Image (cartoon, grey):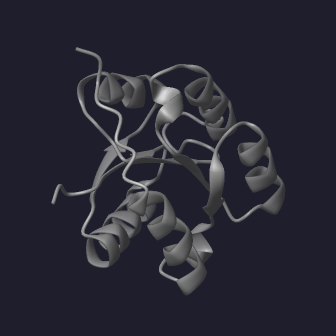
Amino acid sequence: MLTKRVLSVGQCFADQSALSRTFRSDFGAEVVGADSAAEALGLMESEAFDLVLVNRIFDADGASGLDFIRQLTQEPPRANVPVMLVSNHDWAQDEAVKAGARLGFGKSSLGQPQMLARVREVLDEGVRVLPAE
């Protein structure tokens, strides 16, 4: 079985570490971090991912994660990769879903049963978009 691969965009070091630990222990998934939209898009050009996690506000440059989600969900084949917003704000989750993301989770719910079930549902779908040849 292939290891699930998750791209995590815009997290600070501490949150990236917490996400990596949770995804490794609960899903056996590898988490690859990207600080910016440009870095994430570059990784998506060359590597396959099963899920993209996007921080509401990117730690490195203050960019909008919601804008990045809108960009991702409009560009095939990237539009086929499931995307989740990482934010505790319900209004931001609503905006992300309207933009084409799956309902995500907040950092405060990391490792909680509802968060784990939500992510497991997406990872179990097995949608992995390979980079363009």
* Residue 65 in picture, x, y percent from top left: 62, 39
Picture quadrant where residue 106 is located: bottom right
Say which residue appears at 29% left-offset and 30% top-offset. Answer: 130
Picture quadrant where residue 113 is located: bottom right
Q: Is residue 27 above or below residue 90?
A: below
Decide if residue 39 is on the left or right side of residue 55.
Answer: left
> Which of the two residues, 88 or 115, is positioned nearer the viewer here?
115
> Which of the two residues, 52 or 36, is positioned nearer the viewer here?
52
* Residue 15 in picture, x, y percent from top left: 45, 63
Residue lying furthest front: 125
**Quadrant the N terminus occupies:** bottom left
Say which residue appears at 53% left-offset and 29% top-offset. Answer: 79
Picture quadrant where residue 58 is located: top right
**Quadrant the C terminus occupies:** top left
* Residue 56 in picture, x, y percent from top left: 64, 47
Say which residue appears at 32% left-offset and 71% top-offset. Answer: 27
> Which of the two residues, 28 or 87, is positioned nearer the viewer here?
28
Q: Is residue 41 above or below residue 126?
A: above
Q: Is residue 50 above or below residue 3?
A: above
* Residue 98 in picture, x, y percent from top left: 78, 41
Q: Is residue 61 above or below residue 96?
A: above
Say which residue appears at 73% left-offset and 47% top-offset. Answer: 97
